[in-house]
Amino acid sequence: MTTTLATDLHDLDLTEVAHLIQTRKVSPVEVTEAVLDRIARLDGRLHAYALVTAELAMEQARRAEDEIGKRRYRGALHGVPIGLKDLCYTKGITTAAGMPIHRDFRPTFDGTVVKRLYDAGAVCVGKLQLTEGAFADHHPDVVVPVNPWHPDHWSGASSSGSGVATAAGLCFGSIGSDTGGSIRFPCTANGVTGLKPTWGRVSRYGAFELAASLDHLGPMCRSAADTGVMLGAMAGADPNDPTASQKPVPDFLAGDDRDLTGVRIGVDDRYNGDGVDSLMVRTTQEAIRVLTGLGAQIVQVRFPDVDQILRDWLPLCAVETAVAHEATFPARRAEYGPGLAGLIDLARGVSATALQKIWLRRRDFTGRVAALFQSIDLLAIPGQYVASPTIAQMATLGQDPNAFVALTRFSSPYDMAGVPVITLPSGFTPKNTPVAFQLVGRHWEEALLVRAGRAYQRETTWHRQRPKDH
């Protein structure tokens, strides 16, 4: 391997590194050493990792190198360094879920997603930091991951470490989780590509819960193709999780990514524009024009009203979180941060009849979304309502009861409906911080999202931009 290649490795996509490994132009050991060196050099400033697993990573890299040398190549993840959100159980390795209360928890088994990634030959370089219990705020004792584009700007919740590490070249892909937007927020904030799959596409066994019926595990990467590779390894039925779908796992990289003729993309200008930052509106419109140039047909639609479902998300999440934490809350309440404790406290005020009404409205909304997709194949929406908010802006959310609802306008409804969404970088602010747009699909049609994302990224270079090392 040449010095130039070693220097540039961290800028490559997962699939590009995989090709170099498969063709033996670079070895898994060399790649892993380069990533670990980069983590050692940069993560003291970025704080993306809760724990670096250098010994495990080198062991896995040496095994991959030996297997590939013996022509036992497992696929595109073989020998590639990735990061795991620290709510994924890792056997014998601390899994804290952003909670000091769990700082000594070492699972006795690997979660299903972790095991499947290991079986695909992936190399785990560490556990990535997250908000407390995967809710909105980091625990006061946790150092918040720093946006590598600008330290004054939000790095996203709750998969903040995953977004930062993937953007900064501290791994080639990562696992995130999304309950109200926590794959998509950090992807938008850090300029990476993320895929929230259909609820049930990926097993949740061996992952800390926030809200069971809303939680989605998914990949966060540098390109749409990369997300297809990772999802292909992660997805599928699991006897340990009866809620994981029995549907066969398709080839998520199938289909023509040069031509979108015949693909109908729905656009609701009012939904995409009311109360939305002008830069987000403009970059979303520009992305839609790129998709039109690839042959996609734009269909004007009226998306189902989201006002009530946005307000329903928080009490539903609160009740499900209270169930997930009943072993330690309120018994150890003093060890919780104010954000997560406040969410669980909220659950006490939700009556059984109020909860049932939420579930009925959720069913109604999900049905309306499914009906909309009878006339379209994809829906194009902004990444969020405001472009690249600062940390100071985010700190004021609690002062405005409508601010949290506005923040989740383009995220939580799709967790409530359980439909798949891909987030794609689509531009930059004047301060050179990233923005993104999203494509929403029908249940189980992640392959079309990946195909459309690959097509978009053939025509644009936003996803190729990298933050500078400082």
Image (tube, helix red, strand yellow):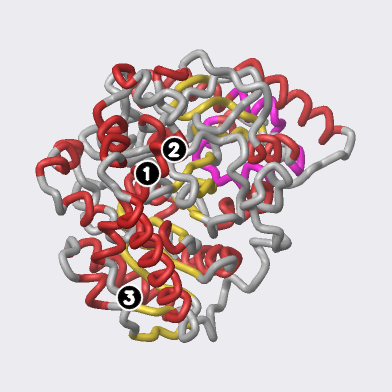
Give me the residue at 32% from left, 61% from top: 410
Whether residue 374 is visible, yes or no, is yes
Above or below — where is 285 with respect to 413?
A: below
Disc 1 element: helix
Q: Residue 165 at what x, y percent from top left?
A: 45, 34
Give me the residue at 18% from left, 61% from top: 277
Cα gap from disc 3 to disc 1, whole angstroms: 25 Å
- Report which quarter residue 108 is drawn in: top right
The numbered mark, 3 or 2, whose residue comes first in the sequence reads: 3
- Find the magenta span and give its range: 7-33
Cα gap from disc 2 to disc 1, whole angstroms: 7 Å
Marking on residue 304? 3
In this view, the residue in front, 266 or 79, is 266
Disc 2 element: helix
* Amino acid type at image mark 3: Pro
- Report which quarter residue 343 is drawn in: top left
Please tell me whether residue 25 belongs to the stretch shown in magenta: yes
The quadrant of the rendering that contains the N terminus is top right
Whether residue 426 is visible, yes or no, is no
Q: Which residue is mark 2?
A: 323
Disc 3 element: loop
Q: Principal SS element in the magenta part?
A: helix
Cα gap from disc 3 to disc 2, whole angstroms: 30 Å
Marking on residue 319? 1
Q: Which is closer to the viewer, label 3 or label 2?
A: 2
Give me the residue at 53% from left, 39% from top: 174
Asked if the residue at tag 1 contacts the one at tag 2, i.e. Cβ–Cβ closer than 8 Å, the answer is yes
Marking on residue 185? none
Above or below — where is 331 with respect to 83?
A: above
* Amino acid type at image mark 1: Val
